[in-house]
Image (cartoon, grey):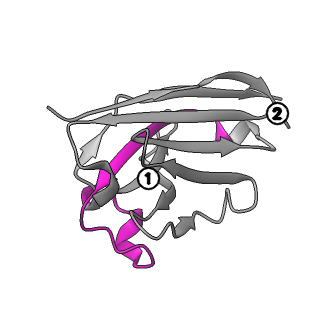
Amino acid sequence: QVQLVESGGGRVQAGGSLRLSCSASGITFSSHSMGWFRQAPGKEREFVAVISWIPSRTNYDDSVQGRFTISRDNAKNTVYLQMNGLKPEDTAVYYCTAGLRVRLYDSSVRLPRTYDYWGQGTQVTVSS
């Protein structure tokens, strides 16, 4: 049974930082690209960042480039999202996702249907 479990969400003031973690089980973690999406109330789920399985190449949405950093620890089956300089518009539920056939620099990387597995999400709230 595949499980992706996110943690680290919470409430923070604008300009603050949070680090999200996603622990994976039931998959060959080192073979999967790992990503983060987010969904705000009334909006569609949107791409945030992705990291390849090996070597660790990354891709970010323009809205988070330079503020967020995605990383992974294959020994711990965990992917992270370090979020700095948070803004109120970053408020959303953040979802961890895993995919076997993710083309990192193709437009399909932004599509939820590209990925195979999803976590339940963790809430991030940024107050002004």
> Which badge, 2 or 1, comes first in the chain's sequence?
2
Q: Residue at x 57, y 34 (%)?
A: 20
| Quadrant position of the N terminus in the picture | top left
In contact (CB < 8 Å): disc 2 and disc 1 = no
Residue 39 counted in the magenta span? no
Vertical placement of residue 11 versus 42, above or below: above
- Position of 49 with respect to 1 (left or right) is right
* Residue at the extreme top of the image, as rendered: 11
Q: Residue at x 39, y 41 (%)?
A: 77
Bounds of the magenta segment:
90-113
Number of the label disc, if any, that sits on residue 2: none
Residue identifier under label 2: 16
Q: Position of residue 12 (x, y in %)?
A: 76, 24
Image-quadrant location for residue 19: top right
Residue 75 seen = yes
Under mark 1, the amino acid is Gly
Q: Position of residue 32 (x, y in %)?
A: 31, 57
Q: Secondary structure at mark 1?
A: strand
Residue identifier under label 1: 35
Q: Position of residue 114 (x, y in %)?
A: 27, 62
Q: Cα distance, mark 2 to mark 1?
A: 22 Å
Under mark 2, the amino acid is Gly
Vertical placement of residue 92 versus 84, above or below: above
Q: Secondary structure at mark 2?
A: loop
| Quadrant position of the C terminus in the picture | top right
- Position of 118 with respect to 8 (left or right) is left
